[in-house]
Image: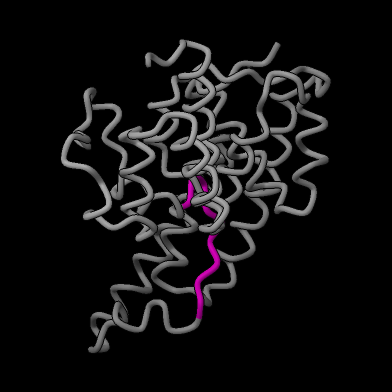
Amino acid sequence: MSVSEFAVDEITRTLDKGLVRYAMGQREEAIRFWNDALEQNPGNARALDYLQSVGALSPSSIGSEVDLSPKDPTDAVGLATLDRAGESLVPPFSPEPGDFADRLPVGDADADTMVADVDILVRDAREREQAGDYEVALKNCEDALRRDPEHKEAQDLAETLRQELNDVYLKELQPLDRTPFLRAKDSSILELSLDPVGGFLISQIDGEITVEELLTILGTFDQFRVLSSLHYFLVNEIIELR
């Protein structure tokens, strides 16, 4: 029995909701969505692939007549996409103790070089900030902090830059009563490396909820991460505001 175009769209949305849940660390919820898609369309290759990838379905339970190879290169999301799902979209820098132990130089000369590199990055970040290039400035600060997580000037400047970018991103979203609509195809969205904030944000964009309502819904998240995700979606034409 053929599946109607409407049903195909509904199945795709169900599969994508599962991916978002998986990106948020909600494995059981993701499995539930993929099983729902499988009930709507028994033998659906994507659903079977996802379930098998997370260990919820053994290869022996899939019939030999089911072809799991993607019909389109953009549909080849399987385990590789699931493994990337937790990667940050625009991650705030928050190193854990010991994260950089294996990168610390051994000799005094190497240590002096690292300090010099950090100072250069921070100085360049200052210059970028003065030029209004806040995003590059923040990247330089985060690079500096990767080399020296305790660098006070880099920490303070990074926090200042996040506040400045926060204001910039919020201004570009005005007026906040506009509604975000998805422009990107589902396959393109699935190729994104979304962190839990970006994944949850995408799941809430339904063409009805306004920017202001989105910010309220995600009020418990770090506002900079929410706004930077919205900015990323906007400049990359993943969403548009109407």
Q: Position of residue 219 (x, y in %)?
A: 79, 48
For the point 61% across and 48% down, the residue is 197
Quadrant placement of the N terminus: top left
Work out whether 135 lies above or below 52.
above
Choose top left, top right, bottom left or bottom right for residue 169.
top right
Quadrant placement of the C terminus: top right
Q: From the viewer's perspective, tell me whether residue 242 is left or right of residue 194.
A: right
Work out whether 128 lies above or below 88.
above
Q: Is residue 107 magenta?
A: no
Q: Position of residue 183 (x, y in %)?
A: 52, 16
Q: Position of residue 171 (x, y in %)?
A: 74, 27
Choose top left, top right, bottom left or bottom right for residue 119.
bottom left
For the point 47% across and 43% down, the residue is 34
Q: Position of residue 226 (x, y in %)?
A: 66, 43
Range of residues picked out in magenta: 88-96
Of residues 25 and 166, the one nearer the viewer is: 25
Choose top left, top right, bottom left or bottom right for residue 112.
bottom left
In the displayed orientation, state which residue is furthest to the bottom. Answer: 107
For the point 22% across and 35% down, the residue is 66
Q: Main secondary structure of the magenta part?
A: loop
